[in-house]
Amino acid sequence: MIDQIDTQDLLWQNISELPYFRGFLRSIESKYFRELQIENPVLDLGCGDGHFSARTFENNQLQGIDPSFRSLLSAKRYNYYFGLICTEGNHLPYKKNSYKTIISNSVLEHIPDVDSVIREVVRVLLPGGKFIITVPNSNFTNNLSIAKFFDKLGIKLFANGYRRFFNWISRHRHPDPTEQWLGRLKKQGLVIKNHWNYFPPPSLKILEWGHYFGLPSWLNSKVFGRWVLNPKKSNYLLKRIYFWIYPYYQGDQKSLNGAYTFIVAEKQ
């Protein structure tokens, strides 16, 4: 149990700038990425507002792409990327064999035609280059706590309806089994070097309920343009959230029953 806040750790950096439930997840993913050797040059596929990469990677040369011009404007404010391009993932404006590493953090699950994006990734990767992704898997859908509550009551209609609803608000088109994600990559000629599931049911419950308890953060973002109005240690509520989540953050998040999958694939 900790009694002091380390403002430099990934958990604090994320929950002081994002809704706490999203910051919790991102801090775990940042830890995993930092454990890897990320070789330059790097393409951030679906960089969004740039927050994740700006807080995760050090001394890397990242080019970011995203189909949302508005998100790219937010990413530009970090002054982190050496280039940002507005484009779809299935039409990458790069020559064959351009990048040593391509990362994609919680992006592919939102794309309808994900196979065409993976084909483009393979085209622009250098031989021996790595495609590193995080995606939700079928445990995300199966282990939602409210749906499981309805399962116990035998009300399958409500349970399945809630699962569809939560994937809808999460904009998930592909919360697919881990083996299906691995199969997609293998189909395009990539070799799986490593993979694991993470974010077990207790952590998923924090994420799930955070979508509801995090409503004030959403209002802050719409009214003030920032998720957290006071990101300092003087914010009592933020401190309590930090101490509450820290044991989960510090513990082992890898689990066969984890709701997300981390995959490192390589082009031969």
Image (cartoon, helix red, strand yellow):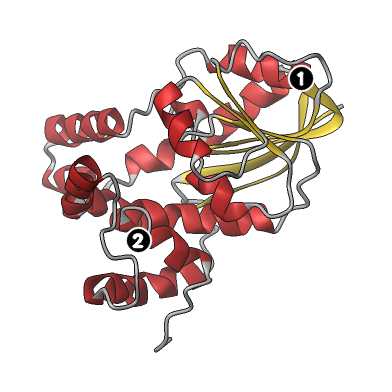
The residue nearer to you, when weighing 73 against 159, is 73
In terms of secondary structure, where does tag 1 sit?
A: helix
How many callouts does the rendering have?
2
Nearer to the camera, 54 or 151: 54
Report whether residue 176 is seen: no
Whichever of callouts 1 and 2 sits on the residue coming sooner in the sequence is: 1
Local packing at callout 2 (Cα closer than 10 Å; few below 14, some 14-19, many 20+) is: some
Figure quadrant of the N terminus: bottom left
Q: What residue is shown with label 1?
A: 124
Residues under labels 1 and 2: Cα distance?
Answer: 38 Å
Q: Which residue is mark 2?
A: 202
**Side of 131 where 241 appears, left or right:** left
Q: Do callouts 1 and 2 mark residues in contact (Cβ within 8 Å)?
A: no
Which dot marks residue 33? Answer: none
Question: In the image, is 213 to the left or to the right of 78?
Answer: left
- Say which of 80 and 95 sits in front: 80
How would you rate the neighbour count of disc 1 (Cα within 10 Å): few for under 14, some for 14-19, many for 20 or more? many
Q: Is residue 207 left or right of residue 191?
A: left
* Residue 10 drawn at (x, y percent): 51, 64
Q: Nearer the viewer, residue 30 or 258?
A: 30
Q: Position of residue 112 (x, y in %)?
A: 45, 15
Residue 61 can be seen in this image:
yes
Q: Which residue is pictured at 43% across the width and 36% down the height?
A: 138
